[in-house]
Amino acid sequence: MNDILTIADLKARAKRRVPKMFFDYADSGAYTEGTYRANEEDFQKVKLRQRVLVDMTNRSLESEMIGQKVSMPVALAPTGLTGMQHADGEMLAAQAAEEFGVPFTLSTMSICSIEDIASVTTKPFWFQLYVMQDRDFVINLIERAKAAKCSALVLTLDLQILGQRHKDIRNGLSAPPKFTPKHIWQMATRPLWCMQMLGTKRRSFGNIVGHAKSVTDLTSLSVWTSEQFDPQLSWRDVAWIKERWGGKLILKGILDEEDARMAVSTGADAMIVSNHGGRQLDGAPSSISMLPRIVDAVGGDIEVHLDGGIRSGQDVLKALCYGAKGTYIGRPFLYGLGAGGKAGVTRALEIIRKELDITMALCGERDVRNLSRRNLHQGN
């Protein structure tokens, strides 16, 4: 991993090691992928204010997200099928995050289950919830997260209807993969990935199979998931979930000032400005372009985080300057996982930490909690 210097380096290595269908799943957006590209490109438009001849010693990246101490204000985002980038992927990523001192968020659509993560970690992790029409299953997920001592529930609001991702359809994506000539060829050209997957029993959706009604195999799972996302999800459901959960609640998928003000009224602990990584509404604005507007709209009444487009520590710093109290990385840690398992996830975090630290120093700041819009160049 010593020759890996950037998140782009990890991406290139992951592309060589992970079967195409699963790499494409991580590296894709909806329809034209315009919003996916904008998430990255709009960060480049934000310019930093360089300062010189200031004391740059004794710098600190330590902060808090929803009252939880973090070694830097970065969490691993909830990502589906993580265990298909690398065998036992969610478990390895959770361990790397814990050792690094940042939160790990497990997706409902993970390969490893809530219980799997709890078995290999010693500190509480976060759990991301999709609200399904089967409310008994939702209640079961919440209770399982409580039993695992998860310290926050991340409720995703922007997946009532699944956005179309052309690559997944063309690739015939499934977990576990189908045994067609195309899929067999993809796996045969990735022998190390195959050997690792043969060494684990976790190859399907661990939070769902055996827990949801009548979901016992791949066929029943496919039918169930296609019917279960709830298009009638409303703010009333958020109140019900908040009461049922009873702990820290983070609302993910806010991209509009009016929705942000509604989120404040729910009493949630934080919101995540996010467009689902460009995987839902193609043509929506980038997360970073909406962040300052949403921060201004809520006026400090709720903690604001950002997800989407972060590929460097500089991107993290820009989000913090605009008022985010925390950020999330999805694809960067997935690239790390595909490139080198647990060590790759750690490397992704190291890259972002070093870039954030050096950039902060060159902006004339020593404490990450002091970053603000004064650190951004206003001459654009």
Image (spheres, rainbow, N blue to C red):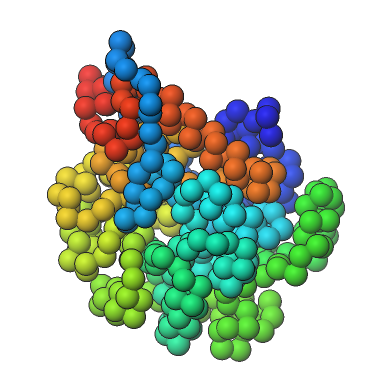
The reply, left or right, for residue 359 in relation to residue 340 is: left
Asked if residue 18 is positioned above or below residue 242 in the image, the reply reads above
Q: Quadrant of the N terminus?
A: top right
Residue drawn at (55%, 62%) of the image = 122
Q: Quadrant of the C terminus?
A: top left
Q: Report x, y in % for residue 120.
A: 62, 63
The reply, left or right, for residue 120 in relation to residue 358 is: right
View extreme (top): residue = 53
Q: Report x, y in % for residue 237.
A: 30, 77
Asked if residue 169 is positioned above or below residue 49 in the image, the reply reads below
Asked if residue 219 is positioned above or below residue 270 in the image, the reply reads below
Q: Report x, y in % for residue 149.
A: 46, 71
Residue drawn at (31%, 46%) of the image = 325
The reply, left or right, for residue 1 in relation to residue 69 is: right
Question: What is the quadrant of residue 238 in the picture?
Answer: bottom left
Residue drawn at (26%, 34%) of the image = 370
Residue drawn at (56%, 80%) of the image = 224
Q: Report x, y in % for residue 81.
A: 61, 61
